[in-house]
Image (cartoon, grey):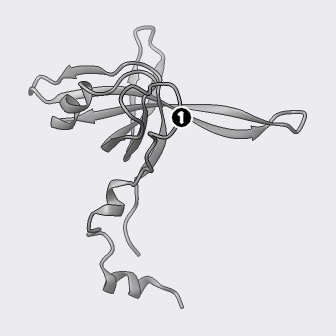
Amino acid sequence: MAGDINRVTIVGRLTRDPELAHLPSGTAVLKLGVAVNGRQKDEGGNWIDKPNFFDVKVFGNQADALNNHLAKGRRVGVDGRLDWSSWEAQDGSKRSKVEIVAQSVQFLDSRGEGGGGGDGERQFVPAAATAGNEDFSSSAADDDIPF
């Protein structure tokens, strides 16, 4: 059986303008907030929208490039992995959070189209779907099939 898999793909809208920073090594880090709408039933049995909010980090050259093109309200597709971190707050309490570390971010609407849907929206294709996937060679995948 293959090893563990840590992969996440989301499509949503930016909740704020991106924040660009640099690590002491000089590597660019872009922080994004992405809202993804889901649906759930309320107490009365009616379907309602339920937003989920995700913090996303993008590193390197991609961070610099995205900073020039992203803004609050833009629709994006994010493909990456989950990263958990913990720390002790100033008041002594323990804190933790899970973020998405992006492998790729795609624009899914035209530049001037911040808040609306419309004809400019594109289909999101995760990065691994278009690249050769080294994790699953055809012979290894065939050996794992139980029938």
Q: What is the quadrant of the C terminus in the image?
A: bottom right
Asked where in the image residue 48 lies, by quadrant, the reply is top right
User: Along the line of sight, which residue is nearer the eye, 93 or 16?
Assistant: 16
User: Along the line of sight, which residue is nearer the eye, 45 or 88?
Assistant: 45
> x, y (%) of residue 103?
29, 46
Q: Is residue 137 above or below residue 18?
A: below
Q: Is residue 93 above or below residue 117?
A: above
> x, y (%) of residue 55?
42, 30
> x, y (%) of residue 10?
47, 44
> x, y (%) of residue 9?
44, 48
Q: Secondary structure at mark 1?
A: loop
**Hey, which residue is sitting farthest bottom in the picture?**
147
**Hey, which residue is sitting farthest right in the picture?**
44
Q: Which residue is mark 1?
A: 117
Using residue 47 as the reference point, say whether residue 36 is left or right of it: left
Q: Amino acid at mark 1?
A: Gly
Task: Identify which residue is drawn at 21% across, 37% down.
Answer: 62
Asked where in the image residue 22 lies, by quadrant, the reply is top left
Task: Identify which residue is drawn at 36% across, 62% down.
Answer: 129
Asked where in the image residue 16 lies, by quadrant, the reply is top left
Q: How many C-alpha atoms fall within 10 Å of the one at disc 1: few (<14), some, or many (≥20)?
A: few
User: Along the line of sight, which residue is nearer the eye, 46 or 71?
Assistant: 71
